[in-house]
Structures are given as structure tokens and as C-alpha cells.
Image (tube, coloured by chain):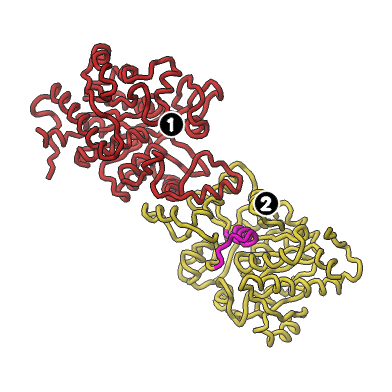
Chain colours: A yellow, B red
Amino acid sequence: MAAQSRSLPAVVLSGGVGGARFAWGMARVLPAEALTIIVNVADDLELFGLYISPDVDTVCYTLADLEDPERGWGRADETWHAMETVARLGGPTWFRLGDRDLGLHLERTRRMAQGEPLSRITQDFCRRLGVAPKVLPVTDDPVRTIVDTVEHGPLPFQEYFVRYRTEPQVRGFRFVGIEQARPAAGVLEALQHAAIVLIAPSNPWVSVDPILAVPGVRAALQGKTVVAVSPIIGGRTVKGPAAKMFRELGLEPSALSVARHYADLLSGFVIDTEDASLAPRIQAEVGVPVLVTETLMQPKPRREQVARSVWEFAVALYEVVSPASSAHGPLGEG
Amino acid sequence: MAAQSRSLPAVVLSGGVGGARFAWGMARVLPAEALTIIVNVADDLELFGLYISPDVDTVCYTLADLEDPERGWGRADETWHAMETVARLGGPTWFRLGDRDLGLHLERTRRMAQGEPLSRITQDFCRRLGVAPKVLPVTDDPVRTIVDTVEHGPLPFQEYFVRYRTEPQVRGFRFVGIEQARPAAGVLEALQHAAIVLIAPSNPWVSVDPILAVPGVRAALQGKTVVAVSPIIGGRTVKGPAAKMFRELGLEPSALSVARHYADLLSGFVIDTEDASLAPRIQAEVGVPVLVTETLMQPKPRREQVARSVWEFAVALYEVVSPASSAHGPLGEG
């Protein structure tokens, strides 16, 4: 069974850091051809005429083992000479672009200007960086998160996130362009083919929701085994403003609130051992099995353990609904 | 007289390296407010969506003492991490952009996208980099040199210059857009105000001609004391393809050919001591006084000596036509 379950086709829905680390773990659990990571693009922005896709880049860098382990974004062994010049010339430096990182934005912008879609460029970059699983931006169309804030009104996501360091109080979110966005080539196919869809421990509001809101994506999850991992542990987030957002929207920042957020999608839910006491309530209220396990993904080797626990839980749930020989046969592992 | 002559207003017409070094020398001879450097932009290009102005940047970097002394372009203490990424991702690396240099292209592109003209951005950058004389791109309008070559047909200048390392055989040059180009704000004013115009030892074909060909520039030189410095010494150029171009166009690569090229503009001409024997012929044929002096501008301290010799020669010529109290009074030096 182990060999068979490992080769079930799976999709991970991911934002930035947390999702990227989880995807890194999953890439060690599943054979590359069985794994697709669908990534949020509503955080994307243009700066200096360059197209920047922070979540896609974090996922690619992390899977390629090029990511900076401390910062949670950008590349390791980075230098900042270009930004030093920008600063000296009086330009904007609130969004810090490292020199190595810049090269990717330059080349992507060049190819996009020639009409190539983000999704195809991303796959080519991943291949060149040695990333084996398929990484797909959820859409090639422009979708932009606007964070409605008390202090500054509507803010483009990166201004809220980087420029204002997530300090403004959040009222709500809009994903501009989402109604017109079409799933990128391969997104619906990957979801249709998937036996299991894993929602990574990413921000539900601004990382996962703008994936789910791309027309066709939510519908493609119907009938799938969908398991989400809570990004909130003990009322806090490892990285990012998810807990603060829940509070500001009048919700308790807890794994329970996350489970409620995804309730209509879930086949199962994963919470950290620190939140074990919440399990019965989640199970009762949301009506799905709950896995209580270690979910912290630092230091790096722990990611594989987290991914393996989540995967075994998801496969067990999958086998309940699709016993014995499922529609998705094993892909074979050589 | 020395004090008065030093404060006569002057314009230098400049391309890249040679012109930049000469301008550096002139900046030590004249007070900043008396000196304007008008720079070629027909070498400009867009790469990765960034606007790059190689001659303007070389002049600014050189005047700011930021230039790389070996390469003749770009900045000293440069790193190449962005281009390493571009290379790894399979992108074009024939035009090498250093990390520190990239910051300038990023910020300029950002400001140009907001509608600011190149000339205003250049002046602001110069101020921030501590460059005192006024540096003006000859035009804010797009002018692009096309090099007609035997082997590859028409090539955009930087492809000829960098990608093909000036190897193709030249048939001629065109400056696309030149008829529609308007002098940048301040260009005609500087020329009108100038007592003396110095044509730097830059490439006559692809650096100086596309300055002179901007409508209004050539006319503004009428009646001025115009002195050119030969970029060809002993049949060779210190940097760049000027000598090779003369040959391929069927002309002898010599200071004489350069003097002939500028004949209708010149009040005087400056050649290197190595070419002293050409002086009588130039004087006879082109009909202007010739200064024979050291013109090599390396090592760096020599630039000031070259500039001072050229300046004293030009002032003497100026005083012949505008004796005693000239229309241009001294600017005063404190």
C-alpha cells in the first residue's frame, strides 16, 4: 500500500513561505510526476518595470534549495548592490530586490514582454533550477489583492505587506481582476487528475482564497479528497499576518477559525500538537477528521516529516471514499 | 587672462569612454557652472524592459569617479550576480549589466515610465552622484544608430558593438528617428551661451555625428569657436572601432581623416604628438590651426593636462575672433 499511496497524483495549493516549505516536504514524499504545486499570484506586482511574483518565486527558490533560510523570501548568499544604487539615486527601496533575485525578474520580464505566459516561463525556470515537481501559477491573467485598511484605505497587497509591514488594520480583501482570470494551462487538468488536494499552511485570506477564487478552481475541487494544514498554531502564525487578520476581521485567530474558513471544501484538517485540545471541537463543528501532529517546518529536515504525516492522513481519507482499486491507478515508480 | 579664459562658457560634445575622460579633465579646468557636456544617445537601448543609455552613463560614472578604470564601461567594484541568474535561466547575456549599474537602469526606467524626460533624470542623478558640470543627453527623443554591415545587414548599434564585438564590416550608418528628434531642454541654450565648443576624442561616426545631426545642433555651432580632438592616434584608436570604421568606409584611418570629417565646423584641431608630421597637411587642407600635444588620457592625472592644453588652444583661437572684452564676460570665480 505504501508504494501505491505514494504515487497518487496530488496538488498542493500554496502561497509563499509556509506553502513553499510544505511543498519542499511533499517533493520528498511524492515522486515528481505525481506532484503539482498551484501557486497564488495575487501578490504579484510591477516595480521598476519588472514583473515580480513573490509567491511563485518563493516556491521555486525553496524547491531549488536556493532560498534564504532566515528571511523567508529571496535567495541565499544574496547581495544588494543594485538597491544600494537605487537608494543613492533617491529611488524607492521599500521592496528589497537582491541582485541574484533581480536576474530572475529581468529574464522573466523580458520573456513576458515577448508574449510568453507566466506559467510557461515558470515551468522553464523551474526546470533550469532543477525543480522536479510542476509549479504552476494559478492564472496567467492579472489578479491583484487589494487590502482594505482602516488607516490607509485600499492598499495594493505588497504596500500593505512590505511597505507598511502589515501594520494597518484590515477591513477586508478584494482580488481585482479575479472574475476575468482564467486558470493557467495545466491548472484544471492537474486538479481533475489529482486524487488529493492539499491546502498548504498558507494565509487563507490572501494566499489560498485568491487561488480558490479563480473561476473553475473551486468547482474542480468537488469530489476530491481535500486536506488543509492550519497555518495558525497556538493562536499565532509562524510567518506573516494571518493571525492578525483573523483578529481584525473579528474572528478568533485559531486553527478552528481556519477550519471554519475552509469548511465546505474539507475532507480532513491538520492541526499542530500545540492545538490538540481544539481537535474535538473542529471535528464536531466542521465535521471532518482532524490530524494532530507536529506541523512546524523548521529546521528544514522536519518538513519531510510534516509532509509525510499529512500525506498519510490524506491517503487514508482518500481510501475511505475510493477503496481498493481507485480510479487513479498508481503511476508506477520504476 | 588665465582667470578670465578659464571662466568662458564651454560645451563638450561627447560619446562614451574617450569623451568621458576628456570631460573629466575639462571638469578640472573649468568651474562647474561654465561647463556643459552634451552626450550622444543614439547608442541607447532597451534590455529586459530597462532603458540603458551607455554614453550618458559612462560620462556620469566617469565624472563621479565611479567608473571601472579597466573595462571602460560600467562601475568599479562591480558584481555580476543578476547576470549570473540570467545566464542560469537561459537568458541573453551578451550585454553585461553589473549589479551596481543595474540599480541606475532600474530607477531611471521607473522615472521615465512616469513621464520624466531622460535629460531631467540625468541631471538629478548627476547631482546625487556629486557631478558638478551639467550633463545633457542631446535629445529626450528616441534616436537609434543602425550600423549597416556586410555580413549581417543592418544591426542596432549595441548588437554591432557588443554582441558582434565590432567585427562585421561597416557599410554606413543611419540614425533612426533623428529627423523628429528635438534637442533636450538646455541643449540649444548651452550651445548658444557657449564661447567654445569642444568635440571630444569620441567616435566621429557613431558618437559625435548623431549629436550634430539632431536638428538645430549643427546650426547652433555657427560662429562658435569649435575645436575637435582627434580620437585617432597613429592610425589607431585608444578604445572603440573608429579606425576600423574609417578603413571599411574606404578612408585612411588618421587624424587627417578626422579633421576632414569635421572640416566645415572647425576653428582648430588637436592631434597627438605621435601624429605631428600630419600637422602641416591638416593645416593646409582643412585650413585651421592645429595643436600638436599629448592627447593620451591614461593614467588618470593626464586627463587634466590634455584638457588644459586643448582649452588654452581653444581660448587663444576664441580671442582672435573675439578680442579684448568678448560678448561673454567672465563668470567670476568667487
Image quadrant where one finds the C terminus of chain A? bottom right
Residue nearest the observer in this picture, B205 or B255: B255
Residue at horizontal 26 percent and vertical 17 percent from the top: B277
Magenta stretch?
A: A54-69
Q: Residue flagged by tag 1: what amino acid is it?
A: Val
The tally of labels here is 2
Q: Is residue A259 left or right of residue B226?
A: right
| Residue B234 among magenta residues | no
Q: Is residue B77 left or right of residue A103?
A: left
Q: Is residue A158 above or below residue A171?
A: above
Q: Percent from the top left, x then y, of residue B55?
A: 38, 37
Residue A285 shows in the view: yes
Q: Which residue was labeled with disc 2?
A: A127
Q: Is residue A159 above or below residue B2?
A: below
Q: Is residue B292 left or right of residue B77?
A: left
Residue nearest the observer in this picture, A142 or B1: B1
- Kindly state the secondary structure of the residue where label 1 is placed: loop
| Residue A67 among magenta residues | yes
Q: Which residue was labeled with disc 1?
A: B143
- Kindly state the secondary structure of the residue where label 2 is placed: helix
